[in-house]
Image (cartoon, helix red, strand yellow):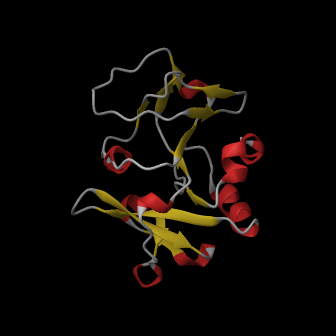
């Protein structure tokens, strides 16, 4: 999946990339993040604001900036936060529990990414998923924001 992502024009053209920091059974992003830092990409990772149910976006300069935060997900330490507005991001790598080929997704139910993605900006949106996470259809609501592509271990899905 990393090779598919890194060879995509959206990744190659992006200067500032928002990655989720994987945990549990999510598609592993740790190596992708570290390699992107080596490629001199500006890497942004989320910090969970559980009070407001939002994500704070912070520039990551070193893996050492991270610690197990809310829900034990690795996130920036408070003293290492370098907040970046969503409008500066070129590419968003989005997690999900399941996706359909239209780009709809179901997350863990907290609504954090849904709130973030409602903030319109020019950033492209790519979901990372294993093939077994791709289903025929997901019920949607009018406010749902889709990903534009899904990268799996077997293919890149151009969502419609």
**Residue 125, percent across and down?**
52, 42
Relative to 133, is 75 above or below? below
Relative to 118, is 106 above or below? above
**Residue 147, percent across and down?**
49, 35
Q: Is residue 4 left or right of residue 14?
A: right
Q: Is residue 33 left or right of residue 148?
A: right
Residue at point 42% right, 59% down? 86
Numbered disc total:
0
Q: Is residue 87 left or right of residue 151?
A: left
| Quarter of the image that includes the N terminus | top right
Residue 73 visible in image: no
Q: Nearer the viewer, residue 146 or 99?
A: 146
Quarter-wise, where is residue 83 in the image? Answer: bottom left
Residue at point 64% right, 55% down? 14
Residue 96 visible in image: yes
Residue at point 36% right, 51% down? 116
In this view, which residue lies farthest toward the bottom? Answer: 79
**Residue 107, percent across and down?**
40, 39
In this view, which residue lies farthest toward the left? Answer: 51
Q: Is residue 3 left or right of residue 87?
A: right
Q: Nearer the viewer, residue 118 or 57?
A: 118
**Residue 79, percent across and down?**
43, 85
In this view, which residue lies farthest toward the front? Answer: 122
Residue at point 43% right, 28% down? 104
């Amino acid at each position: 999946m990393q090779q598919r992502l890194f060879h995509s024009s959206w990744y190659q053209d992006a200067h500032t990339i928002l990655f989720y920091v994987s945990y549990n059974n999510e598609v592993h992003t740790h190596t992708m993040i570290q390699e992107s830092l080596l490629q001199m990409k500006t890497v942004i990772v989320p910090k969970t604001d559980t009070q407001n149910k939002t994500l704070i976006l912070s520039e990551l300069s070193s893996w050492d900036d991270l610690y197990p935060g809310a829900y034990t997900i690795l996130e920036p330490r408070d003293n290492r936060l370098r907040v970046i507005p969503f409008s500066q991001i070129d590419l968003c790598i989005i997690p999900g529990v399941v996706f359909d080929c239209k780009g709809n997704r179901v997350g863990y139910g907290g609504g954090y990414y849904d709130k973030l993605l409602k903030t319109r900006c020019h950033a492209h949106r790519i979901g990372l998923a294993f093939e077994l996470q791709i289903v025929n259809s997901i019920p949607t609501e009018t406010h749902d924001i889709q990903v534009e592509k899904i990268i799996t271990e077997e293919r890149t899905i151009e969502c419609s």
